Amino acid sequence: MALIEKISAEEVLDSRGIPTLKATAYLQDGNFGTASVPAGISTGTHEAFELRDADESRYGGLGVQKAIANVNGEISKILSGVEASDQRKIDNALNKLDGTGTKRRLGANTTLSVSLAVAVAEAKRGRLQLYEYLRKNVLGESNETYELPLLMTNVIEGGRHVDKGLDFQEFLVIPRGFQFFSEGYENIKKLIKSLEELAKQKKHDRSLGIEGGLALNLKSNEEAITLIKEAIDASGLSKERFAIALDVAANSVFKDGQYHVLDFEFPLGREEYYKFLTGLCKKHNLFSVEDPFEEDNWYAWTDFTKQVQSATLVIGDDLTTTNLARLETAISRNSLTGVIVKPNQIGTLTETLDFIKRAKEAGLKIVVSHRSGETQDNFISDLAVAVNAQFIKIGSPLQKERYSKFKRLLEIEKQLNKN
Ligand code: PGA
Ligand code: ZN
């Protein structure tokens, strides 16, 4: 048992050079824990509120000095003297102090940094690995079988994550059927290399997207899928070992009632777009599609999920935003078969875990995910293992803020194999 002494926060820069918060929770017994929070670009409307300074003279208004003042001031004050192992009490206190239901006053970035930092400090105090602490102490589960998630690796990037390029946000590859996470990782690295060489050979203009995926100037989204297939063939690795997936992030292709995709010279109506997407799933045997439709089009989601049935997973990100109420609607409408989990979409650890628990009960697949603006914080790697998430999305290992999460998973695998 240890009480919180104080919480403090400072401004650090994320992978895009934009400020974010790094919070430290100090316990009275001398232990402490830190956590830095990520931020998204293609954010859903239903995400909890992210507090920025809106002071144009610093980082174009994106500073987080107000959030830091909230941590160092009123949050530290109410949490000082609170038992650090009572995560729910801490998160409830944060929500109560905020008082808006959407973290509009304190900011979800603010509350999350505190919520996670306390968990990290308490795991350290108990001399537990973070994934063990989350499983045993926060979730209160006794199951000691930890499974490493499968990688959903962003190999080609587009949408709002690149200056110019494809309209679908992420073209992902899942290495599967390998006994160890480390083998999957090694093989995905080989595939990325093969893809880079192929793009070079074909003289495609290329740069890196915000998550480290290749940003390519191709003629259509389908061409990216074909290119990945060619790269798999060229790598000499077995085709069965790689599945291909998409994050359409459809909010960004949907405008004025129509869908704008490079694959067609004209905007598509709902029916045509629907046909195009279901056609892609079938033709390319897509493993999963994230955000196939815009965030409030429940009807289309349900229809699409029914249409692709068990052949392709339908994953909600902007639709569900790690929000329990949105998840309940999605479950009751059969709108999807998997969910993205991003702690910063909701703003506390226990709300994130409640969301995961409910999604699992409903038989949905869990994809723990980073954001496009990341630090080297690895919390989500431990989170994925703690809840036995089937998948994790941490971008491409070509970027250090993403690589640190791969590295943590490799480390966890080693520990688990030793035991
Ligand atoms: P974001 O993108 O972090 O920019 O929101 C990631 C995603 O949509 O999965
Ligand atoms: Zn997404």
Image (cartoon, rainbow, N blue to C red):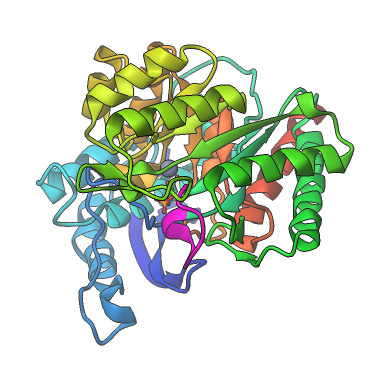
Q: Is the C terminus in the top left, top right, bottom left or bottom right quadrant? A: top right
Query: Is residue 124 covered in magenta?
Result: no
Q: Residue furthest left?
A: 99
Query: In this image, 84 relative to 389: left or right?
Result: left
> What is the tally of numbered marks visible in this picture?
0
Q: Quadrant of residue 249?
A: top left
Q: Residue at x 33, y 34 (%)?
A: 293
What is the magenta range? 159-168
- Looking at the picture, tell me which residue is in the foreground, 314 or 383: 314
Judging depth in this view, the residue of 82 and 171 nearest the camera is 171
The furthest residue to the front = 265
Q: Give x and y (percent) for residue 196.
A: 76, 57
Main SS of the magenta segment? Answer: loop
Instruction: Check the image and report above or below for 153 versus 193.
Output: above
Viewer can see residue 37: no
Q: Is 165 one of the magenta-colored residues?
A: yes
Where residue 83 appears, x then y in whole percent?
33, 40
The location of residue 208, given as percent across then percent down, is 61, 64
Left or right, residue 33 beside residue 395: left
Residue drawn at (26%, 36%), measured in percent from left and top? 89
